Amino acid sequence: MVSLLTVMALGHEVVCVIPVDEPVQSVAKDLGLNLQKPKNINDEEFVGYLRTLKADLFVCCHGRQIIKDKLLVTVRAINMHPCLYKYKGAEPIRRLLEDKNKKASVAVHWMTEKVDEGNVIVENFQNVESGTIVGVYNELYHLYSSSLIEALEKIKE
């Protein structure tokens, strides 16, 4: 939700929201945004629909589906990921905590069909104190916003 609100606060037009959870869905609905919930984001019909929107950039935060090349050739896409420097893939915060690692981060990287393998645009770091997944995310929320702002500025250049 932080990413959606950050994009909007920067004055960007949001042409479609594909929510990953109820809070994002609720906020998007309350804001009157175009809300879509495809079972498969890579479905030909849905990719065709996205093409009609003529978006400049696809911003993914905590997406749960692997985006395939047929969508990635339609629009440039970035992904936000915690602790990308060490924990690519699913459940990075859980793995950070299991390792008793206190060095957390939020990265923004270009999406490729290989999960979390695109070039990093920006990654900001912070030491965290919490011993819970929710606690770590709460400590990192401000980095989601600032990292996205920084990445969007770099992309614009």
Image: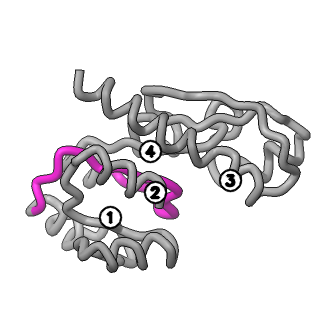
Q: Earlier in the sequence, mark 1 or mark 4?
A: 1
Image height check: is 69 above or below 112?
Answer: below
Q: Which residue is mark 2?
A: 66
Residue name at image x 83 percent, y 35 percent:
102
Residue 143: x %, y % from top left: 56, 39
- Residue neighbourhood size for the residue with mark 3, other residues' Cα within 10 Å, grouped as few (<14), some (14–19), many (≥20): few
The magenta-colored residue range is 53-68
Disc 4 from disc 3: Cα separation:
19 Å
**Amino acid type for the residue under numbered disc 2:** Ile
Disc 1 from disc 4: Cα separation:
16 Å
Could one spot residue 69 in this view of the protein?
Answer: no
Nearer to me, 127 or 120:
127
Disc 2 from disc 3: Cα separation:
25 Å
**Amino acid type for the residue under numbered disc 4:** Asn
Residue 141: x %, y % from top left: 59, 48
Q: Which residue is mark 4?
A: 79
Residue name at image x 33 percent, y 78 percent:
30
